[in-house]
Amino acid sequence: MSAEKTNQSWGGRFSEPVDAFVARFTASVDFDKRLYRHDIMGSIAHATMLEQAGVLSIAERDAIIDGLTQIQAEIEAGQFDWRVDLEDVHMNIEARLTDRIGITGKKLHTGRSRNDQVATDIRLWLRDEIDAIIKEITRLQEGLLEQAEQHADVIMPGFTHLQTAQPVSFGHHLLAWFEMLSRDHERLVDCRKRVNRMPLGSAALAGTTYPIQREITCRLLGFEAIGGNSLDGVSDRDFAIEFCAAASLAMMHLSRFSEELVLWTSAQFNFIELPDRFCTGSSIMPQKKNPDVPELVRGKSGRVFGALTGLLTLMKGQPLAYNKDNQEDKEPLFDAADTLRDSLRAFADMVPALKPRVEVMREAARRGFSTATDLADYLVRKGLPFRDCHEIVGHAVKYGVATGKDLAEMSLDELRQFSDQIGDDVFAVLTLEGSVNARDHIGGTAPAQVRAAVARGKALLAAR
């Protein structure tokens, strides 16, 4: 039976057409058509190489490139007819090319397979996605630096176990997120190196008998290296898994950040105000202002974690080389990249618009005996062992709980009942400013160190 009768590029082997349901079930064009630009890019490079290798004539190469360029214009104008019976983005474009330029279009696939073609397309696409995501990380970091610099002197409670621990600068707290994002950036930059290796030329699994010159396509497509084994080139998706792992870590960070923003905007904390444009209301409770953007980002982290788990599960049982299972790599990968990029964009837009409620934060820092460690450190400097100081301050805190007084609100006589080493100078360390300013070292919360960290952060971003 002819290929035309089966509507398949591979129909010569078959004696009956594919079942209509099976055709829909096995087709990927509904989701892999987003690879069209990268598929055309790869095909243009392949045709250019085939001409230089003497497989195509100059006229054939030019006809193919011109036809592909016109097809891209059709797609981008919304005039392209995507056909499920042609299975995927690759065969849809190749069939349209043959419609346009005739038999020459059928020569494009010389020396390659859909196996190395799709592996190349995904790498080209993911390379661009990583670049876009990295830009959003940088934009979010710029917003954090701006806020940290502006609010280096604003004091808030730092927490452990969600209990008041020690006072910190609001700017210092925001810079913690800057550091996390810096590591996310590093991971994605490093991941990109392994994404940017070219499988094209691996053909179906064993390479090709045609005199291809992979160095040409590698250079034309901007790959950093050529895949060294054809079996590996067509069959592994570890680069996609690695990306999803890096994306999962980044989404985990954004989810934690989201959780803090949700807490901070609640009536119970009331630390910050989110602009109305990043919130929604309630259909029944008119007073509500819901922090939907951070809540949604927190929820979307699960999608990316799921993509990572799905790809690991997809690959774990596959023998070499390519298997149809790998058609299932695209949707989770696409979704993970889309979700991370959109979440970063939302945060990059939102963070510069955050407004801290300075007095509310300061009052919260005054509660919970947040300068207790400072009192212990004060007694250590008087010559007492730290463990003894810890016990002394514990008794002072117990007294404060009973009397409703913070350490800084106690009189000198009240404090001296716990240690005669306490003198008039103790009140300098019990103030919030004294506590924050005392941590004046690299990585500490002192405002001077916050400003120094901002300067280092700006230099880091400028060097990218």
Image (cartoon, rainbow, N blue to C red):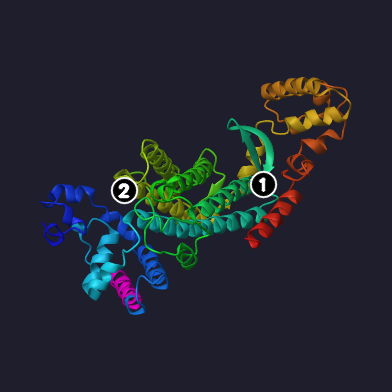
**Viewport quadrant of the C terminus:** bottom right
- The amino acid on which the numbered mark 1 sits, given as a three-letter code, is His
Circle 2 Cα neighbour tier, 10 Å, few/some/many (<14 / 14–19 / ≥20) = some
Q: Is residue 146 above or below residue 290?
A: below
Observer-side mark, 1 or 2, equals 2
Could one spot residue 349 in this view of the protein? no
Q: Is residue 382 above or below residue 312?
A: above
Which residue appears at 72% of the width and 54% of the height? 451
Q: Is residue 409 left or right of residue 355?
A: right
Q: Position of residue 367 (x, y in %)?
A: 65, 34
Q: Which of 345/15 is in front?
A: 15
Residue 75 is inside the magenta segment: yes
Point out the tag, 1 or 2, that comes first from the N-terminus: 1
**Viewport quadrant of the N terminus:** bottom left
Could one spot residue 447 in this view of the protein? yes
Circle 1 Cα neighbour tier, 10 Å, few/some/many (<14 / 14–19 / ≥20) = many
> On residue 248, which mark appears?
none
Dot 1 falls on a residue whose secondary structure is helix
Q: Which residue is mark 1?
A: 172
Q: Is residue 71 left or right of residue 129?
A: left
Q: Main secondary structure of the magenta part?
A: helix
Q: Which residue is mark 2?
A: 327
**Could you say which quadrant of the image residue 403 lies in?**
top right
Q: Is residue 113 left or right of residue 238?
A: left
Q: Position of residue 393 (x, y in %)?
A: 76, 24
Residue 419 is inside the magenta segment: no
Which region is colored magenta?
A: 61-79
